[in-house]
Image (cartoon, coloured by chain):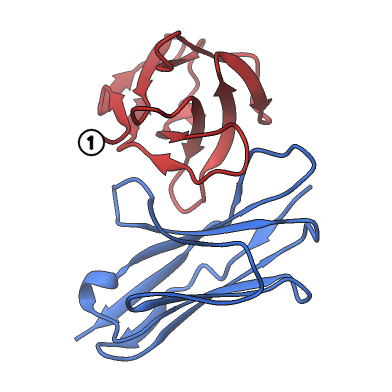
Amino acid sequence: DAGVTQSPTHLIKTRGQQVTLRCSPISGHKSVSWYQQVLGQGPQFIFQYYEKEERGRGNFPDRFSARQFPNYSSELNVNALLLGDSALYLCASSSEGQGETQYFGPGTRLLVL
Amino acid sequence: QKEVEQNSGPLSVPEGAIASLNCTYSDRGSQSFFWYRQYSGKSPELIMFIYSNGDKEDGRFTAQLNKASQYVSLLIRDSQPSDSATYLCAVKGTGGSYIPTFGRGTSLIVHP
């Protein structure tokens, strides 16, 4: 079975631009979470979606938004990019919205110039 | 604010030794505990999870949980150079909290 997939793998943008990152969960998983990881830090929670509803939101500005589609795939959008948004963006899927183990995708490395 | 603390390291051990990685957490109501391995430039990979006090073994890995002390550890026996990576501790609470909190990770170096 395929694991969590993310696209694109790498992305270079300039300040002020907008970016959309995509994630497909493991087959049968209905929950998708997004994390931001900067160098030397652990993943920081951005959003969690379960059955297309937002289940949680981390301490990120409104420039960050996400949604989940009927097939449980998800998109993370970031508007008005800042240099500080440069990071590895991770998507994780789990089989339930609560209590279940999360499995990570390969990540999207975003560089903002 | 729920916190998960890990020594950033690096922890350096010789090949064949036991590596001991530690993690403390602030939320006394935490119920689920996870260890992930992350190679440089890659995404985290689940190694083990533990829910109950005591030890849980899986191959060369043993997770140890002490809820009274709010402490979880990962032991790696017969360490290999391929174990060199950053090890992330993640803790999930109760009360409808679906989101794990991650520590910053401990860098492990296993030298031949």
Q: The C terminus of chain B is located in which quarter?
A: bottom left
Q: Amino acid at mark 1?
A: Asp
| Residue that lies at the very extreme toward the front in this rendered image | A28
Residue B94 at x, y = what percent?
A: 75, 47
Residue B5 at x, y = what percent?
A: 64, 64
* Residue positioned 75% across, 50% down in the render: B2
Confirm whether residue A64 shows in the render. Answer: no
Residue A77 at x, y = what percent?
A: 47, 13
| Residue that lies at the very extreme toward the left in this rendered image | B112
* Residue positioned 41% across, 68% down in the render: B107
Chain A tint in image: red
Q: Residues within 10 Å of mark 1 (few under 14, many from 20)?
A: few
B5 w.r.t. A97: above or below: below
Confirm whether residue B96 shows in the render. Answer: yes
* Residue positioned 29% across, 47% down in the render: B42
In the foreground, B48 or A21? B48
In the foreground, B44 or A51? A51
B11 w.r.t. B94: above or below: below
Secondary structure of the residue carrying numbered label 1:
loop
Quadrant housing residue A48: top right
A105 w.r.t. B43: above or below: above
Q: Which residue is mark 1?
A: A1
In the foreground, B93 or B88? B93
* Chain of the residue that carries numbered disc 1 in the rendered image: A
* Residue positioned 43% across, 74% down in the render: B10
- Asked if residue B55 lies left or right of residue B36, the reply is right
A25 w.r.t. B103: above or below: above
Chain letter of the blue region: B
Residue B54 at x, y = what percent?
A: 62, 78
